[in-house]
């Protein structure tokens, strides 16, 4: 029987496979780090369970229908399919499907173009989707532009280019 610091590897494997404890739950149970659990799994050749669930052929058809016919964003398609968005992105990549640009962005990046055209100290009103305009900061930082943003009510903000 394999043991590490009085921890039975067989018992740990049983908790993982039969009791469905996650790596984090095992780490908490044994009062060790997540990384220790990972190392022990590698050291003792315990195969981790596949993460997430796979899409069946029917799931794939439904996901494609939701995306193209109902025009749902990938996050909603993933939620309804019971998988994460990376599974949906992989599905689209496998079938050569380009993602539809949403939130008022066109293929060239409407927001990026507007930010790039702004002069320093110039102000413009922008609309944003969701509860936060944090995406504007992220986009500006990605293209090397510094901005200041002031909220002007629901889904509207005043953007000033400062660098």
Image: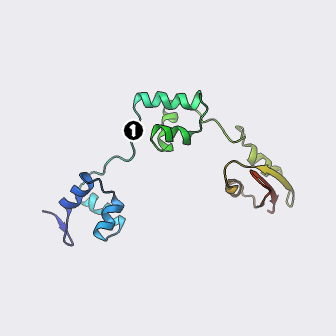
- The structure residue drawn at horizontal position 34% and vertical position 46%, both measured from the top left corner, is 50
Q: Nearer the viewer, residue 119 or 84?
A: 84
Q: Is residue 130 above or below residue 32?
A: above
Location of residue 39 by image quarter: bottom left
> From the viewer's perspective, is 157 left or right of 33?
right
Quarter containing the C terminus: bottom right
Q: Where is residue 68 in the image (x, y as percent from the top left)?
A: 58, 28
* Residue 117 locus on image (x, y percent): 83, 50
Residue 59 shows in this picture: yes
> Which residue has dot 1 on it?
54
Near mark 1 (Cα within 10 A), the count class, few <14, some 14-19 or many ≥20, is few
Give the x, y percent position of residue 74: 56, 39
120 displayed left or right of 30: right
Q: Which residue lies furthest to the front in this view?
A: 154
Q: Residue at x 82, y 59 (%)?
A: 160
On the image, the x and y values in percent for residue 142 come to 67, 55
Whether residue 97 appears in this view of the structure is: no
Q: Which residue is drawn at the image coordinates 75% and 58% (left, top)?
A: 145
Residue 41 lies, with reference to residue 105, above or below; the image says below
Answer with left or right where residue 87 lies relative to residue 6: right
Q: In which quarter of the image is the N terminus?
A: bottom left
Quarter occupied by residue 152: bottom right
Q: Which color scheme is applied?
A: rainbow
């Amino acid at each position: 029987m394999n043991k590490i610091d009085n921890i039975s590897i067989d018992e740990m494997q049983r908790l993982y496979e039969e009791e469905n404890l996650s790596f984090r739950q095992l780490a908490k149970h044994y009062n060790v780090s997540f990384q220790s659990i990972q190392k022990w799994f590698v050291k003792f050749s315990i195969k981790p369970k596949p993460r997430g669930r796979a899409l069946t052929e029917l799931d794939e058809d439904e996901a494609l229908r939701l995306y193209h016919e109902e025009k749902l964003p990938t996050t909603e398609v993933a939620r309804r399919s019971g998988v994460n968005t990376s599974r949906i992105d992989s599905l689209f990549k496998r079938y050569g499907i380009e993602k539809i640009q949403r939130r008022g962005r066109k293929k060239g990046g409407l927001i990026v173009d507007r930010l790039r055209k702004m002069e320093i100290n110039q102000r413009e009103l922008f609309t944003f989707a969701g509860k936060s305009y944090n995406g504007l900061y992220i986009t500006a930082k990605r293209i090397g532009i510094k901005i200041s943003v002031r909220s002007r009510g629901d889904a509207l903000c005043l953007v000033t280019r400062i660098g």
